[in-house]
Amino acid sequence: MKRTYLSIVGLMLLFIATGPALADWQDQQDAIHQLWDARAPVGHTQNFPANQCDNWAALPQNVQAVSTQTGSGLVVPSVSAANNALTDGLRQMAQSLHAYNTALTNVGTFYPAEVDGPFLMDAAYWQGAGRSPHGNALDHLPQINLAGLDNNTCPAGLANMNRQQVMDALNQTNNISNSQRWHCYSNRFSTVGQDHIPLTGYVEFTQQEYNGYNYAAADGRIVYDYVNNLVYFTPAHYRQWKKADFAQDMTGNYGCTPGGTCCDPFFKIVP
């Protein structure tokens, strides 16, 4: 009896320490399918079928209230960060960004804060995850009002710094908001190869995972709206996916073939 009691206590402590198991995505199609099944409004997903993912006007009010209209005509569904359809790493990054204050101007407030999860969310974490600005060329995300952001306020010398140095310098710059700091960061890394990416208010991060998604490094991308503090995610590297079976569409330049058979590549991750 004593041994059985100790075993039960041990299992309880293990559950408390690890928490409920989150998603384990097998590939891009599986990730898309699981996230789509977790879309809001939970309990009323029949009101938002995949064949209406490009027909905002046809969606009932309760679906529109928790979804996002875009200039492309495609609709971005929302998924709660508390939903177990998310992987550990995605949930941790999303929750950290949700807690971020874009208005702070104090020195030492640029890096998002540590939250519970598998990773140590120090400066090195964000330096490793940070990528380029997101150009939103196909309007798969809503347009952002950039009024009030002025890169003439950026600290001098960023052009000659690497990513770690830029982020550390912005963290030590006073009297500009975190939104402006990310705008300065985006401007510094807006040239990728021969391409110049326009500044749209979005910045990209690589999804950080240990074992929840083997394609995280290659295809998992968080796109952060640093003006309105909103988090979007694509598990298939910005590729649209098929209404019929959730498979990623491999048309060049993130298009869809044939037209009208795909849904928006993004899911909005909400608190």
Image (cartoon, rainbow, N blue to C red):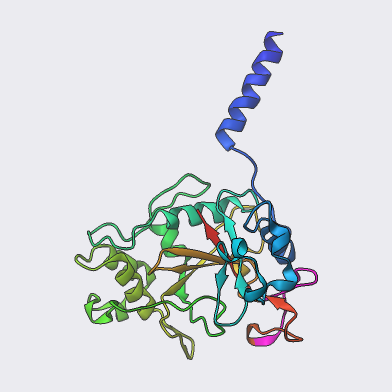
Left or right: residue 271 compared with residue 167: right
- The region drawn magenta spans 240-252
Q: Is residue 246 left or right of residue 139?
A: right
Magenta stretch encompasses residue 246: yes
Figure disc tally: 0
Image coordinates of residue 72 in percent, x first then y, are: 59, 82
> Which residue, as the protein is rendered here, is positioned at the far bottom?
194
Q: Nearer the viewer, residue 79 or 165?
A: 79
Query: Looking at the rendering, which quadrant does residue 35 occupy?
Result: bottom right
Q: Is residue 50 above or below residue 188?
A: above
Horizontal and vertical percent position of residue 63: 62, 63
Q: Which residue in the rendered view is the most extreme toward the right? A: 244
From this viewpoint, which residue is outermost toward the front?
61
Residue at horizontal 37 percent and vertical 69 percent from the top: 227
Residue placed at 67% from the left, 77% from the top? 54
What's the residue at 70%, 66% (across, down)? 28
Residue placed furthest toward the top: 1
Say if the magenta span includes residue 229: no
Q: Is residue 133 above or below residue 137?
A: above
Question: Considering depth in this image, is 170 or 84 the residue closer to the camera?
Answer: 84
Left or right: where does residue 99 sit relative to residue 175? right
Residue 249: image location, x then y, percent = 72, 78
Q: Quadrant of the N terminus?
A: top right
Q: Main secondary structure of the magenta part?
A: loop
Q: Vertically, is 137 above or below 141?
A: below
- x and y, in percent, of residue 91 in the image: 54, 53
Q: Quadrant of residue 263?
A: bottom right
